[in-house]
Amino acid sequence: MPIEILMPALSPTMEEGTLAKWLVSEGDTVSSGDILCEIETDKATMEFEAVDEGTIGKILIGDGSEGVKVNTPIAVLLEEGEEASDIDAPAPDIKDSAKEDAPDQDAAPEKGYGRGESDANDTDKSSSAVPKGSDGKRLFVTPLARRIAADKGVDLTEISGSGPHGRIIKADVEAASAGSAKAKPAESTDTTSAPAAKAAPAAGPSADAVMKMYEGRDFEEISLNGMRKTIAARLTEAKQSIPHFYLRRDIELDALLKFRGELNKQLEARDVKLSVNDFIIKACALALQTVSDANAVWAGDRVLKLKPSDVAVAVAIEGGLFTPVLKDAEMKSLSTLSAEMKDLAARARDRKLAPHEYQGGSFAISNLGMFGIDNFDAVINPPHGAILAVGAGVKKPVVGKDGELAVATVMSVTLSVDHRVIDGALGAQLLSAIKDNLETPLTMLA
């Protein structure tokens, strides 16, 4: 029976996407891992791969189609022995054809799959066979999982599926073949069944009401793209639901600037040039280890305390921003952090980051100092516990330890804190640790 290829959910916030370009044509034979098309999400353009072999029988959604809902059939794959005449489903309506829920196990099987770069090798795809469990109920198994089970002699009736609605996927069969068939199912990484984030309720007057106010005035109407819609929804939710409070400190940078200059001279032969932001990332990562209770995120009805320092850094791109995450930042050298940050920022601007590269982390940095901003308050990116807003380093008069007036390069920072995760005193300790690291930079190499 022909298999519907469904529009995948390539990120937890994705509700719809643009089918930018097909890389295969009707009649082409594809194998598992072959790239079928490119899909634009609210964050990036990603390649969409086949998970099984077959022939592209029909393309249902054409190049450049916008607003394609997740789980909408976009093409039909023919298995061995099937022909295009076996396809009887009409092309779906893009706006109305999204399937709100995965099929119930007791309902008629619905064949289809969807997968992106960040998904596991198996996704929500029904088997053409109809195996039954010991209770006589239908078992849903992906074709790849069924084939692996046959090759390895694994009894599918002894496996608890971890896919959507209990569907058996590759990871379940592989776990069973290792002698753990009755163990806890493998954790599913299939994002096709993840519920998409709902847009925040509209704030303020409606679009029609606002446009009416400006009747007769000259203006250009700019439609929101997926990224801008997501930013609007998430930040509105963040400001409405997160109890922010703010801590401010001034940090003297002269010692750091001198140390940075010396290091960069020594690193010239390796074509490495450290930025002040690289030191800020390292200082925050180490501070999260020193004040470990602040290395935490809000998880709805609990707090998750992280062990590694996974630091997100805001990167401005055309039409929005990304927050790529530098994982295990406390363990990495300044030169490694610098190279990794440059790579992530470059790929963020090209919208080539995979979801796992900009999701997660417990803490974020937003630096507007290069734009001449002295200080500002940043909005927390949920589920992070805090975000550091970094201003420009400027020459200011300061009172030295001996009471004499001097001039120093001073950088103003503001720590926005989620009061559900971090209390005032704990936040103050974290900001103090960041300040200490930046004002005595040599200690960061110890």
Image (tube, rainbow, N blue to C red):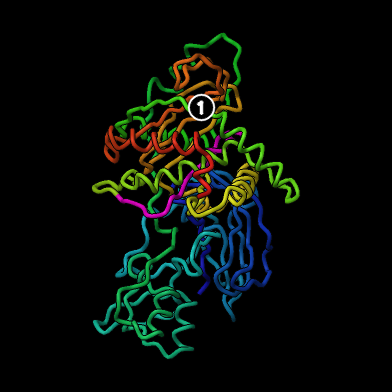
Identified at 43% across, 74% down, the residue is: 171
Identified at 58% across, 67% down, the residue is: 50
Q: Position of residue 435 (x, y in %)?
A: 44, 34
Q: Residue furthest front?
A: 402
Q: Position of residue 131 (x, y in %)?
A: 37, 82
In terms of image quadrants, where is residue 138? bottom left
Taking the magenta stretch, the answer to whether it contains residue 435 is no
Identified at 38% across, 41% down, the residue is: 382
Could you say which is closer to the camera, residue 88 or residue 420? Answer: 420
Could you say which is closer to the camera, residue 295 or residue 410? Answer: 410
Q: Which structural element holds mark 1? A: strand
In terms of image quadrants, where is residue 422? top left
- Mark 1 is surrounded, within 10 Å at the Cα level, by few (under 14), some (14 to 19) or many (20 or more) other residues, namely many
Q: Position of residue 359 (x, y in %)?
A: 46, 49
Q: Residue furthest bottom?
A: 153
Asked if residue 433 can be seen in this view, the reply is: yes
Q: Residue furthest top?
A: 216
Identified at 46% across, 88% down, the residue is: 150
Taking the magenta stretch, the answer to whether it contains residue 322 is yes
Q: Which residue is mark 1?
A: 252
- For the record, the magenta segment spans 304-323
The three-letter code of the residue at mark 1 reads: Glu
Could you say which is closer to the camera, residue 159 or residue 305? Answer: 305
Q: Locate residue 136 relative to residue 8 in the image: left or right.
A: left
Could you say which is closer to the camera, residue 244 or residue 13? Answer: 244
Q: Position of residue 212 (x, y in %)?
A: 47, 14
Q: Residue furthest right?
A: 269
Asked if residue 94 can be seen in this view, the reply is: no
Q: Locate residue 267 relative to residue 419 in the image: left or right.
A: right
Report the label total: 1
| Vertical placement of residue 9 versus 393, above or below | below
| Vertical placement of residue 370 versus 263, above or below | above
